[in-house]
Image (spheres, grey):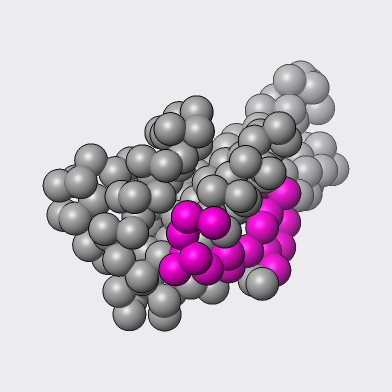
Amino acid sequence: MKCLYYLSPTIASVSKITDDLHKAGIDDWFIHVMSKDETGLTTNKIHSSNYLEQLDILRFGIIGAIGGFVVGLLAAYWFYSAKPFGPDVSVGAYYAIVVFFSLFGAWEGGLTGIATENKKISQFHDDLENGKNLVLIYAKKDAESVIGKIMSRQHPEAELAAIDSSFYNPLTRLKRI
């Protein structure tokens, strides 16, 4: 499933885009809109984006978990080598140390991600601040051509800004068109 990013100039245009996509069989679950005008989205019953799309929770959570895992391995090795609790500590305790640090790192990373704009969406920050609307369309392979035809023929005002192989893979890069 690909994620198609379209920049649209107005909420009225976004409303027409979503109506046309609904007529083509694209469900609301596959259309998310980011806009500075959240009231306009609500008034027009347009499906707004979610926190995973707006914030960098996943990416920082994964990075934190990896960092915590490495720290946990080092801590477990130190406890194994130094034996501060004696020689009879079970292997499960060392696993628990690694799991604890991994989970702590994921938690800390997630907290950092809550305070950070999504890396992929940050490329459109200035456009969003200037009043444009970002339409994210999750396209199944068989619907890509239909969506492309609808957008190019009926909505030339909407600019195809980027195509991503998968939005929810937080470690991939997005190339803006």
Q: Position of residue 11 (x, y in %)?
A: 27, 59
In the rendered image of this protein, does residue 131 appear above or below residue 169?
Answer: below
Residue pictured at 23% horizontal, 40% vertical: 45
In the rendered image of this protein, does residue 33 appear above or below residue 173?
Answer: above
Q: Position of residue 164 (x, y in %)?
A: 68, 54
Is residue 7 toward the left or the right of residue 145 in the image? left
In the rendered image of this protein, does residue 76 appear above or below residue 91?
Answer: below
Query: 125 and 106: which one is in front?
Result: 125
Using the rendered image of the protein, determine whether residue 138 is visible from the camera's viewpoint.
yes
Q: How many marks?
A: 0
Residue pictured at 63% horizontal, 64% vertical: 162
Using the rendered image of the protein, determine whether residue 108 is visible from the camera's viewpoint.
no
In the rendered image of this protein, does residue 64 appear above or below residue 98?
Answer: below
Q: Position of residue 134 (x, y in %)?
A: 43, 61
Residue pictured at 30% horizontal, 74% vertical: 131
Q: Residue furthest right?
A: 81
Q: Is residue 48 magenta?
A: no
The magenta stretch spans which residues?
153-175
Residue pictured at 66% horizontal, 28% vertical: 96
Query: 90 and 132: which one is in front?
Result: 132
Could you tell me what secondary structure mostly forms the magenta stretch?
A: loop
Q: Residue furthest front?
A: 153
Q: Position of residue 156 (x, y in %)?
A: 49, 65
Q: Quadrant of the C terminus?
A: bottom right
Is residue 12 toward the left or the right of residue 55 in the image? left
Q: Is residue 170 magenta?
A: yes
Is residue 131 toward the left or the right of residue 116 in the image? left
Q: Quadrant of the N terminus?
A: top right
